[in-house]
Image (tube, helix red, strand yellow):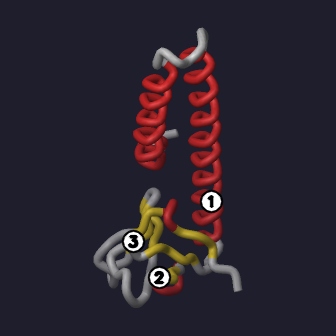
């Protein structure tokens, strides 16, 4: 739960904007009675389910990545710095990578990689 706002912050902001748009539309004169309650309730429920589901899937994948890394398996992480050539990097304990909290770090690489942006390499 400690990473919830970090992982889902963008989606929470977008969800808030969607709720504001829903509130604006449901308060128009052409909408029926109870539209605000039904609209905000329905949209809020859908957003909560989607954001909660995304958080659950992401944290589950993060745990799988950490466990696989500890077993010595290879991990693929998204490289957001270099977008043209190698858009991902393969790392493992054998290559000198370490797990520092939620980040993969290496002496040979200048930046850490967040476990939420990684998957287990299966060949």
* Contact, mark 3 vs mark 2 (Cβ under 8 Å): no
Q: Residue at x 54, y 77 (%)?
A: 76
Q: Compute the Cα span from label 3 to label 2.
A: 12 Å
Task: Say which residue label 3 marks.
Answer: 105
Residue 88 horizontal/vertical position (percent)? 47, 81
Q: Is residue 88 above or below residue 67?
A: below
Pair 3/2: label in front: 2
Picture residue at 45% right of the left edge, 72% below the top: 98
Decide: few, some or many residues near mark 2? Use Cα within 10 Å; few <14, some 14-19, many ≥20. few
Whether residues under marks 2 and 1 lie with C-beta atoms below 8 angstroms apart, the answer is: no
Structural crowding at the residue carrying mark 3, measured as other residues with C-alpha within 10 Å and reported as few (<14), some (14–19) or many (≥20): some
Gap between marks 1 and 3, in whole Å?
Answer: 19 Å
Residue matched to label 2? 89
Residue 64 drawn at (x, y percent) = 65, 62
Question: Image check: 74 left or right of 113?
Answer: right
Quarter placement of the C terminus: bottom right
Do tag 1 and tag 3 residues touch (Cβ < 8 Å)? no
In the rendered view, would you say 122 is above or below 102?
Answer: below
Picture quadrant of residue 79: bottom left
Residue 60 relative to residue 9: left or right = right
Residue 77: x percent and y percent? 49, 74
Compare residues 37 and 92 and report the one nearer the observer.
37
Q: Earlier in the sequence, mark 3 or mark 2?
A: 2
Pointer 1: what residue?
61
């Amino acid at each position: 739960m400690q990473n919830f706002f970090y992982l889902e912050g963008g989606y929470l902001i977008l969800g808030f904007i969607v709720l504001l748009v829903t509130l604006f539309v449901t308060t128009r004169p052409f909408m029926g009675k109870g539209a605000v309650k039904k609209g905000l309730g329905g949209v809020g429920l859908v957003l909560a389910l989607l954001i909660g589901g995304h958080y659950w899937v992401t944290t589950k994948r993060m745990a799988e990545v950490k466990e696989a890394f500890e077993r010595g398996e290879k991990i693929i992480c998204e490289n957001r710095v270099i977008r043209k050539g190698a858009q991902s990097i393969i790392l493992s304990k054998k290559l000198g990578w370490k797990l520092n909290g939620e980040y993969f770090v290496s002496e040979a690489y200048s930046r850490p990689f967040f476990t939420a942006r990684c998957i287990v390499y299966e060949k």
